[in-house]
Image (tube, grey):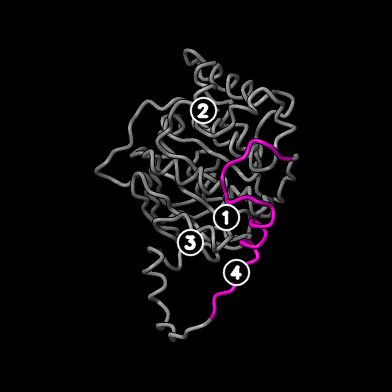
C-alpha cells in the first residue's frame, strides 16, 4: 500500500501505461516484453495461470521491484525515475490480507490513518467502516472476521488517503463463494467512485464479471488484450441451441445458505489462500507499502 494521494489521475492519458517491460530472475525469464494501457476509472484484469508473471508485473508497477528493460508510468509518473511520487498515487492489496489480527477493525484503520499523518483518523475509520458495511464489526478483533470481511477491511485500509489507482493482486484467492461475491461488489464500487483498478486473477469468471478490459498474460507476454466481447469474437460464433438452463453449483450453494451476495457482518475466521506465483512475495510487499509515508 502507498501513502497519501497528492496528484489526481490525468484524464487525457492512460492511468497506467506499460511498454516493453522485461524481468528475469537469473536464467528464468518471467516477463518478455509486456505492453498495455489502462484507462482512468476502469477495471483492467490481468488474467493468467500461476507463474505467468502477474505478481512480478504488479510489484514493478508498485515500485517494489525494478524492471530489467522497458518503461512503465502510473498516474503519468515513471515508476523507475519517480518511485516516491508513484507511491503517493497508488495502493496495493496483495494475495494475503495484511491486517493486524490483534487489533479491531477500527483500530487497524486508525493506525494506517495516523501513519499517513492524516487529520481526524477516527472519523476516517468510521467513514470507511460504513462504506464497506463493517460498522457493526468495527469493534471486534480482526482475528474474528470471516475471510471476506478481512479482505474488505484490507481494501478499506488501502483506500486511506484516497489513492486514484489501486492494484489488487488475486484478491479472492482462498475465499469461499459468498466472500468472493462480497469482494466483487467492493471492487465494482471502487470503479463506480472513479478509482482505477488493476486486478490480477487466475479465475476466468472473476475477469468476466468485473473487467472493462482483459489482458491475457501467458509465458511472460500479453497474447490478447480487449473487452470481453472482443475476446469472444476471436472464436467462431457458437451454434444456437435451446436447452433447459440448470442452476450452477454456486447458485445452489448461495440459495441453500440463504445468501444472495449481500455483504454480511458475521462469519468465522477464513483461511488464507496459497501464494499464486512461486518465489514471489505477496504479504511482505503489502506491509512495505502500508508502512511507507
Where residue 20 appears, x then y in whole percent? 41, 56
Task: Indicate whether 231 appears above or below 133.
Answer: below
In the rendered image, which quarter is residue 266 located in? top right
Could you tell me how many numbered marks the image carries? 4
Task: Indicate whether 230 appears above or below 74.
Answer: below
Viewer-side residue, 166 vs 156: 156
Closest to the camera, between mark 3 and mark 1, is 3
Residue under pointer 1: 24
Closest to the camera, between mark 4 and mark 1, is 4
Residue 208's disc number: 3
> Which range is magenta?
244-267
Q: Residue at x 56, y 56 (%)?
A: 201
Q: CA distance from mark 4 to mark 1?
A: 45 Å
Where residue 197 appears, x then y in whole percent? 44, 45
Q: Residue at x 51, y 20 (%)?
A: 116
Answer few, some or many: residues within 10 Å of disc 4's Cα (few below 14, many 20 plus, some between 14 and 19).
few
Answer few, some or many: residues within 10 Å of disc 3's Cα (few below 14, many 20 plus, some between 14 and 19).
some
Q: Report the side of 290 relative to 4 (left or right).
A: right
Answer whether residue 35 is magenta in the image: no
Amino acid at each position: 500500500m502507498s501513502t497519501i494521494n497528492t496528484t489526481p489521475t490525468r484524464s487525457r492519458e492512460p492511468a497506467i501505461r506499460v511498454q516493453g517491460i522485461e524481468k528475469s530472475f537469473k536464467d528464468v525469464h518471467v516477463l518478455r516484453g509486456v505492453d498495455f494501457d489502462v484507462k482512468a476509472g476502469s477495471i483492467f484484469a490481468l488474467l493468467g495461470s500461476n507463474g505467468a508473471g502477474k505478481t512480478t508485473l504488479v510489484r514493478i508497477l508498485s515500485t517494489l521491484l525494478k524492471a530489467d528493460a522497458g518503461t512503465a508510468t502510473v498516474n503519468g509518473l515513471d515508476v523507475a525515475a519517480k518511485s516516491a511520487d508513484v507511491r503517493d498515487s497508488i495502493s496495493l492489496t496483495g494475495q494475503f490480507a495484511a491486517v493486524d489480527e490483534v487489533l479491531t477493525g477500527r483500530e487497524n484503520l486508525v493506525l494506517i490513518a495516523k501513519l499517513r499523518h492524516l487529520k481526524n483518523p477516527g472519523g476516517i475509520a468510521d467513514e470507511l467502516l460504513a462504506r464497506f458495511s463493517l460498522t457493526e464489526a468495527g469493534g471486534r478483533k480482526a482475528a474474528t472476521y470471516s475471510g471476506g470481511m478481512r479482505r474488505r477491511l484490507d481494501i478499506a485500509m488501502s483506500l486511506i488517503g484516497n489513492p486514484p489507482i489501486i492494484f489488487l493482486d488475486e484478491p479472492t484467492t482462498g475465499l469461499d463463494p459468498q466472500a468472493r461475491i462480497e469482494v466483487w461488489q467492493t471492487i465494482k464500487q471502487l470503479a463506480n467512485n472513479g478509482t482505477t483498478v488493476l486486478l490480477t486473477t487466475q479465475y476466468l469468471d472473476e475477469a468476466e464479471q468485473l473487467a472493462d478490459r482483459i489482458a491475457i498474460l501467458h509465458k511472460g507476454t500479453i497474447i490478447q488484450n480487449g473487452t470481453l466481447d472482443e475476446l469472444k469474437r476471436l472464436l467462431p460464433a457458437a451454434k444456437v441451441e435451446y436447452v433447459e438452463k440448470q442452476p450452477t453449483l454456486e447458485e445452489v450453494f448461495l440459495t441453500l445458505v440463504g445468501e444472495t451476495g449481500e455483504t454480511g457482518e458475521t462469519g468465522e475466521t477464513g483461511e488464507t489462500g496459497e501464494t499464486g506465483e512461486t518465489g514471489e512475495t505477496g504479504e511482505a510487499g503489502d506491509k512495505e507499502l502500508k508502512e511507507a509515508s
